[in-house]
Image (spheres, rainbow, N blue to C red):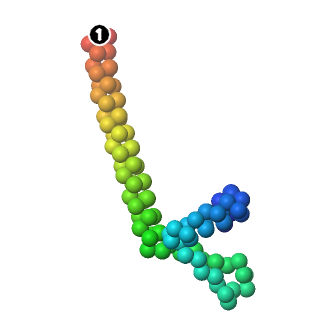
Amino acid sequence: MAEALGVSVGKANYCVRALLDKGLIKMKNFRNSRNKLAYAYLLTPAGFTAKADLSARFLKVKMAEYEALQREISLLRKDSVLVKDSERRFG
């Protein structure tokens, strides 16, 4: 996991422990696995709620960004029409 995230093993472990301590994930060891490092990290109900809240905030920010871009595009179109109109009038 640390390698995939591009962080040290210590940093990955520290973060995983913090998530475990907050009750946002739970860890399950696959005892029958030949790979003794095989673990599953699962979202707890609290973790799912936190993830849903984070996703909702992210979407709210993205929708606001989209609306701001739409307003900017509308203003640019209006400015473009005004420029073209003044070019036609004043040449």
Identified at 33% across, 43% down, the residue is: 67
Q: Nearer the viewer, residue 36 or 80?
A: 36
Q: What percent of the width, then of the height, locates residue 77?
A: 32, 30
Q: Nearer the viewer, residue 11 or 58?
A: 11
The 10 Å Cα crowd at callout 1, few under 14, some 14 to 19, many 20 or more, is few
Identified at 68% across, 57% down, the residue is: 6
Q: What percent of the width, then of the height, locates residue 42?
A: 53, 75
The quarter of the rendered structure image containing the N terminus is bottom right
The quarter of the rendered structure image containing the C terminus is top left
- Based on the displayed image, in which of its 4 quarters is residue 85 positioned? top left
Q: What count of labels does the image hold?
A: 1
Q: Name which residue type carries label 1.
A: Phe
Camera sees residue 65: yes
Q: Which residue is mark 1?
A: 90
- Based on the displayed image, in which of its 4 quarters is residue 66 positioned? top left
Camera sees residue 3: no
Q: Residue furthest bottom?
A: 32
SS label for mark 1: helix
Identified at 67% across, 60% down, the residue is: 11
Q: Judge whether 88 appears above or below 74 on screen.
A: above
Q: Residue furthest front?
A: 21
Identified at 35% across, 39% down, the residue is: 68
Q: Judge whether 76 appears above or below 19 on screen.
A: above
Q: Judge whether 87 appears above or below 46 on screen.
A: above
Q: What percent of the width, then of the height, locates residue 87?
A: 32, 15
